[in-house]
Image (tube, rainbow, N blue to C red):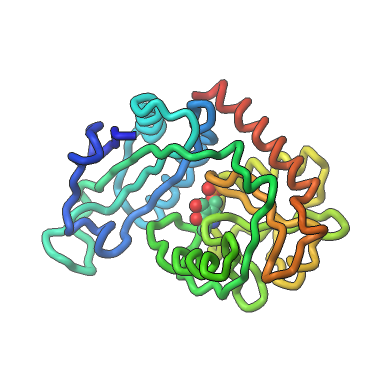
Amino acid sequence: MDIIYLNGEYVSKSSAKISIFDRGLLFSDAVYEVISVINGRLIDMDRHVSRLERSLGELSINASADWSAMSRNLVAQNDLQEGVVYLQISRGVMDERDYRWPSPDTAPTIFAFAQPRVLVANPMADRGMTIITRPDLRWQRCDIKTTQLLYASLMKMEAMAAGVDDAWMAHGDMITEGTSQNAYIISQDGVLISHQLDRRILPGVTRIEMLEQAKLMELTIEERAFSIDEAKNAAEAFVTSSTLLVMPVVEIDGHRIGDGRPGEKTGKIRQNYLAAVQRASSTTN
Ligand code: PLP
């Protein structure tokens, strides 16, 4: 995975350099996307592009490029079969550190790289994830995919220190999402509950296709916040993200979910999700 993209050129990792006055470094003034690659194909690229363009728009960062072609080139040049492509766009480089933005015609800094990773045969899908809950102390615009990830990273480390896989964050008692995944439960009467799209969560690309598949399975879907207690008493729980796809959760704050094994409906949703995105990607890129 030696070839990366930086500001219009494909170069080797070791020769890629950016300025220490880049606003991405000094202010996290940058947005990003992570796109999964399965069988050498980008999954759901168009939805990633839409979300990227929305994130850029919300922050008034002027950047345009053929994001799909850039990602496809990286997959091809690095011969990536399974893993992710990471794209990042910052507002660009300042003359000196300053809270004020540089002039709007400052060139953004654009870079992208590919990383191999096991997605489909992830053994976690067989054992399920364990989760702790923590307060959601992130800023109030979690709908924008910025590189401001320090709080999520701290919570991930707290999860590791507690001997579990990840953390779900909550405002008061109400779960918002995982450190880098959207969070769901399936209630004892079979209703799939997913936090509504608002400023408290990232509108996951995986969430969109997962919900499509759940609808095809005729599951009832409620888009609303759910409480920590509701989650602990759920029949099933799971997360979605471009790297975990659809991943079962089997324990929350030490409470077993269902019988402590990955849920049946979750397993079926994961299977159907994978079949659908692979079908779609084979015809679109
Ligand atoms: N929520 C957060 C906070 C995330 O960081 C991510 C992915 O990085 C997601 C949800 C899932 O989004 P997607 O399915 O687009 O990968």
The x, y position of residue 4, in whole percent, is 29, 36
Residue 180 lies, with reference to residue 140, above or below; the image says above
Is residue 210 in view?
Answer: yes
In percent of the image, x 40 and y 26: which residue is there?
79
The x, y position of residue 129, in whole percent, is 64, 56
113 left or right of 256 in image: left
The x, y position of residue 230, in whole percent, is 77, 69
The residue positioned farthest toward the right in the image shown: 189
In percent of the image, x 38 and y 57: which residue is there?
147
> Which quadrant of the view contains residue 185?
bottom right
The residue positioned farthest toward the top in the image shown: 283
The x, y position of residue 149, in whole percent, is 42, 62
> Which quadrant of the view contains residue 224?
bottom right
In percent of the image, x 45 and y 44: which residue is there?
34
Is residue 193 in view?
Answer: no
Name the one closer to the observer, 208 or 124: 124
127 left or right of 143 in image: right
Residue 1 lies, with reference to residue 259, above or below; the image says above
Q: How many marks?
A: 0
71 left or right of 276 in image: left
In percent of the image, x 63 and y 78: which residue is there?
172
The residue positioned farthest toward the bottom in the image shown: 172
Quadrant assignment for the N terminus: top left
107 left or right of 172 in image: left
